[in-house]
Image (spheres, rainbow, N blue to C red):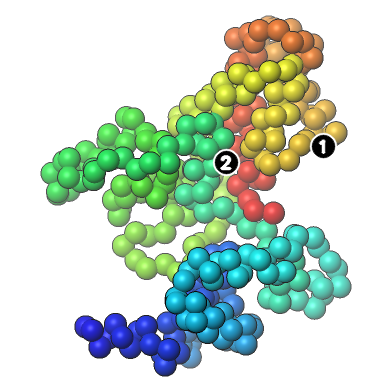
Amino acid sequence: RLDLACWTASRDNPLTARVMANRVWLKLMGAGIVTTPDNFGVMGTEPSHPELLDHLAVTFMDDGWSVKKLVRRIVTSRAYQLAAVHDSANFEIDPENRFHWRMDQRRLDAESIRDAMLAVSGRLDLDPTPGSPVSRVRENRQGMVEILQQARRAPEDCRSVFLPIVRDQVPEALSVFDFPDASLVSGQREESNVPAQALFLLNNEQVISLARSFARRVEGLPGTPADRLATAFEIALGRRPSASEQAAIESFWIDFLHRHGSRGDAATDDRPTTDSESLAMAAYCQALFAAAEFRHVY
């Protein structure tokens, strides 16, 4: 075992550092230099930038196999900092963006989507639950079922990385967004865009609860309802709404209040929030969760 470990981490081994550098590049950039991260053999694809892969692998070893320094090297590069701006001339030459003339737009992974909803709602708990949930139940199939039932009754607000995962009973908040098979090694996530994802965001009880928490967080801020609507937009999407988006938001607000028998012209009034306005804010916050921009990196 010692001989295997020494060979695996040896500078004379051509694979280990390259595989690691490729996986870090894949995680940060959306696609690997070698697009088959689980296969560096003859059946895998050739690297699009072999000299770059060699450079990252060599500097990774020179830096004492420091993943932190490898990440810093990539994220401070020009390639990482490019915008997702379309260029017709470049697209004609490289439609798949293999040569990184722009940033790839991609969807967040399942864990990041769940954590993002918890974060903007103000409920994200950064600390793991003390101890192991397995140690608190029987270490058999029935014990795993009890863990799942408890999680459904009282969903945890911890980061997704701390959630207990039973291989064939993955939480819906993760499985619907292509969480990988926990019994297999997966170097690259599948990425789908299917109706079940939108239906989950519109109907799941935990998503609705998080939207209400997000609404309460925003309602506690000073200003008029219009100010709070714009602030909620900025918290969720990281930017202020455009003029057309602001008009659409205010139209939604007015229509919702009219349907619920409340004043529809109150977006600029600085006064206590009514029950109808609380419902409208929760519905608006849930719509932000369901927006494609909330779930994607641009």
- Between marks 2 and 1, how big is the CA–CA gap? 24 Å
In percent of the image, x 54 and y 59: which residue is there? 191
Q: Is residue 243 above or below residue 142?
A: above
Query: For the view shown, which residue lies furthest in the bottom direction?
Result: 12
Whether residue 97 is visible here, answered yes or no, is no
Q: Position of residue 22 (x, y in %)?
A: 53, 75
Spot occupied by residue 107 in the image (x, y as percentages of width and height): 60, 54
Quickly name the residue at label 1: 242
Residue 110 in the image, given as x and y percentages of width and height: 49, 50
Q: Where is residue 262 drawn, in percent x and y?
A: 69, 7
For the C terminus, give its image quadrant. Answer: bottom right
The amino acid pointed to by label 2 is: Ala
Q: Amino acid at mark 1?
A: Ser
Q: Which of the two marks, 2 or 1, is nearer to us in this view? A: 1
Q: Residues within 10 Å of mark 1 (few under 14, many from 20)?
A: few
- Asked whether the beta carbons under mark 2 and mark 1 sit within 8 Å of each other, the answer is no
Q: Secondary structure at mark 2?
A: helix
Q: Residue at x 57, y 35 (%)?
A: 120
Q: Is residue 99 visible?
A: yes
Q: Quadrant of residue 27?
A: bottom right
For this orientation, the residue located farthest to the front is 63
Q: Residue at x 17, y 48 (%)?
A: 141
Q: Between disc 2 and disc 1, whose residue precedes?
A: 2
Q: Residue under circle 2?
A: 198
Quadrant of residue 103 within the rendered picture: bottom right
User: Is residue 108 or residue 195 the one in the foreground?
Assistant: 108
Q: Quadrant of the N terminus?
A: bottom left
